[in-house]
C-alpha cells in the first residue's frame, strides 16, 4: 500500500528552481489526467509556498509531449458512478476548492498550457495569473460528449467570453487553438513552444513580467473571430432547440457542422449546460459558480448519461452512446431544475466569499 502511495506522489513533481516553485503533472501515459491524490499534492505545495519568501512565482506544466492535462480520471468516475459511490464527489470537492485557491493565489501562478488542456486541465490553468498558450495548444471543455457538464469553473470562464463564444464552446465541446483561447479569455499570452524552456529558466531569477516579455509573440490566426457574428446570433437563443434551429437555418457550413455536433451530444447535458452558463452570468464571483457546479456534478453522478457517455467514448470506444432521454423534446424543465437543487446541508460545497479580486503583483 505504501508503494502505491509513493507512486501516486510521483504523479506531481514538486521542485524549486531559484525563486520559482514548479509543479509538473507526471502521468504522461494518461495525458496527465488528474487523480484525487494529485489535486491534494498541488494544494499542499501551494500552501507551503504561499508563506515561503524564497518562492516568488509558481509554474505548472505537464510531463511528456502531448499536453498539460486532459482532465480528470474519468475511468475512475465511471466506476464510482456505476457503484453509486461518493469518491467522485469527494474528488470534485477538493478539486473545486483548488480551482478557487488558484484564482486567489497571492503570488504569480504561471500556467504553461502547451498541447492538450481539457476539463480539469483548464481548472488548474485558466484560473491562474499568467496563462500561456503555444501553437500546439488545444483547449476545450468537452464534457457534453460524455453526458456531463463543464465544471472546474469552466462555466464561469465561458460565461465571460465575448458574446456567445463561450456558449458555443460549452455546448459543442470544440477545442480551440492559441488565438481563439486568447480571444475567449482562456489565456493571456502566446509563446512559441520552442521558447518555453528558456522562459522557464528565466523565471527562476526574474519577475514574471521581465522574464516573459522577450518570448511573447503574435499567435497564428484563429477561427472564431470570423465566425462570431453567426455564433452570437445562433447561441443567443433561449433554448437548445432554438439554437439548433438557428444553426441549421444560418446557411454557414461551420454552423451546420456545429448543429451536427450538438445532435450527437447528451440532450440532458446540453440543456443543463445552457442553464448553468446563463445562471453563471448572474452568480457573481468564481466561488459562487463553483458551488453551483458542485451541485450539478453531484446530480450528474447519479444520471444514466454520465455512465453511458464514458462507456461509449472511453471504455468500449464504440462512439455510439444511447442517451436517456434520447431527444431534446423529452428533457423537461423539471429534469433540468433537478441538477440545480440544493444538496443536503452537510454535502454542499461552501467556499469562502470573495468580496473582491486579489491583486497579484507580477
Image: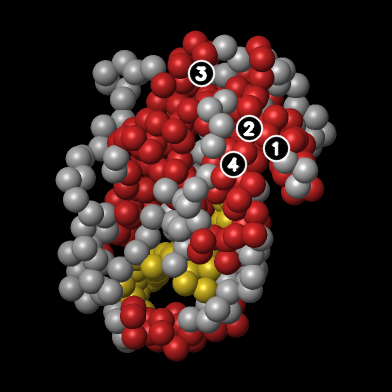
Label whose residue precedes the other's in the sequence (3 or 2)? 2
Give the image location of residue 96, x and y in percent. Answer: 38, 41
Q: Tell me: 194 left or right of 280.
A: right
| Callout 3–callout 2 Cβ contact below 8 Å | no
Considering only vertical position in the picture, is 216 above or below 299?
below
Dot 3 crowding, Cα within 10 Å, few <14, some 14–19, many 20+: many
**Camera-side residue of 282 and 176:** 282
Query: Residue at point 58% right, 38% down?
Result: 235
Q: Position of residue 132 (x, y in %)?
A: 48, 69
Q: Is residue 187 left or right of residue 289?
A: right
For the point 34% across and 64% down, the residue is 129
Answer with the quarter of the image where residue 219 lies: bottom right
- What color scheme is it? secondary structure
Callout 4–callout 2 Cβ contact below 8 Å: no
Distance, label 1 to label 2, CA atoms, is: 6 Å
CB within 8 Å, label 1 to label 2: yes
Q: Which residue is mark 3?
A: 336
Q: CA distance from mark 1 to mark 3?
A: 23 Å
Binning the other alpha carbons within 10 Å of mark 4 as few (below 14), some (14 to 19) or many (20 upward) gives some
Q: Earlier in the sequence, mark 4 or mark 1?
A: 4
In this rendering, the count of numbered labels is 4
Find the distance from the CA under tag 4 to the CA under tag 2.
9 Å
Where disc 4 sits, the SS reads: helix
**Disc 2 element:** helix
Residues at marks 3 and 4, CA–CA distance in whole angstroms:
24 Å
Amino acid at each position: 500500500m505504501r508503494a502505491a502511495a509513493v507512486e501516486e506522489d510521483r504523479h506531481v513533481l514538486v521542485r524549486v528552481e531559484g525563486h520559482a516553485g514548479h509543479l509538473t503533472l507526471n502521468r504522461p501515459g494518461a495525458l496527465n489526467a488528474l487523480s484525487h491524490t494529485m489535486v491534494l499534492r498541488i494544494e499542499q505545495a501551494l500552501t507551503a509556498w504561499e508563506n515561503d519568501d524564497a518562492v516568488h512565482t509558481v509554474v505548472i506544466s505537464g510531463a511528456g509531449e502531448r499536453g498539460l492535462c486532459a482532465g480528470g480520471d474519468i475511468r475512475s468516475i465511471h466506476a464510482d458512478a456505476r457503484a453509486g459511490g461518493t469518491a467522485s464527489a469527494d474528488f470534485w470537492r477538493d478539486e473545486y476548492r483548488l480551482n478557487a485557491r488558484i484564482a486567489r493565489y497571492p503570488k504569480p501562478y504561471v500556467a504553461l498550457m502547451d498541447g492538450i488542456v481539457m476539463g480539469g486541465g483548464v481548472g488548474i490553468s485558466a484560473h491562474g495569473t499568467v496563462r500561456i498558450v503555444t501553437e500546439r495548444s488545444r483547449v476545450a471543455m468537452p464534457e457534453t460528449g460524455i453526458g456531463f457538464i463543464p465544471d472546474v469553473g469552466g462555466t464561469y470562464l465561458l460565461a465571460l467570453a465575448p458574446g456567445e463564444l463561450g456558449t458555443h464552446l460549452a455546448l459543442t465541446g470544440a477545442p480551440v487553438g492559441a488565438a481563439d483561447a486568447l480571444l475567449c479569455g482562456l489565456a493571456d499570452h502566446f509563446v512559441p513552444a520552442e521558447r518555453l524552456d528558456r522562459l522557464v529558466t528565466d523565471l527562476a531569477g526574474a519577475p514574471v513580467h521581465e522574464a516573459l516579455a522577450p518570448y511573447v509573440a503574435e499567435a497564428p490566426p484563429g477561427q472564431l473571430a470570423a465566425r462570431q457574428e453567426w455564433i452570437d446570433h445562433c447561441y443567443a437563443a433561449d433554448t437548445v432547440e432554438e439554437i439548433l434551429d438557428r444553426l441549421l437555418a444560418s446557411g454557414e457550413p461551420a454552423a451546420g457542422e456545429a448543429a451536427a455536433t450538438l445532435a450527437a451530444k447528451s440532450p440532458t447535458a446540453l440543456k443543463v449546460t445552457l442553464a448553468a452558463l446563463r445562471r453563471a452570468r448572474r452568480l457573481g464571483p468564481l466561488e459562487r459558480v463553483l458551488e453551483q457546479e458542485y451541485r450539478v456534478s453531484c446530480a450528474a453522478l447519479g444520471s444514466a448519461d454520465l455512465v453511458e457517455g464514458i462507456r461509449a467514448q472511453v471504455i468500449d470506444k464504440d462512439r455510439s452512446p444511447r442517451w436517456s432521454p434520447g431527444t431534446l423534446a423529452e428533457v423537461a424543465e423539471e429534469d433540468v431544475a433537478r441538477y440545480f437543487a440544493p444538496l443536503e446541508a452537510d454535502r454542499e460545497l461552501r467556499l469562502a466569499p470573495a468580496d473582491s479580486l486579489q491583486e497579484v503583483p507580477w
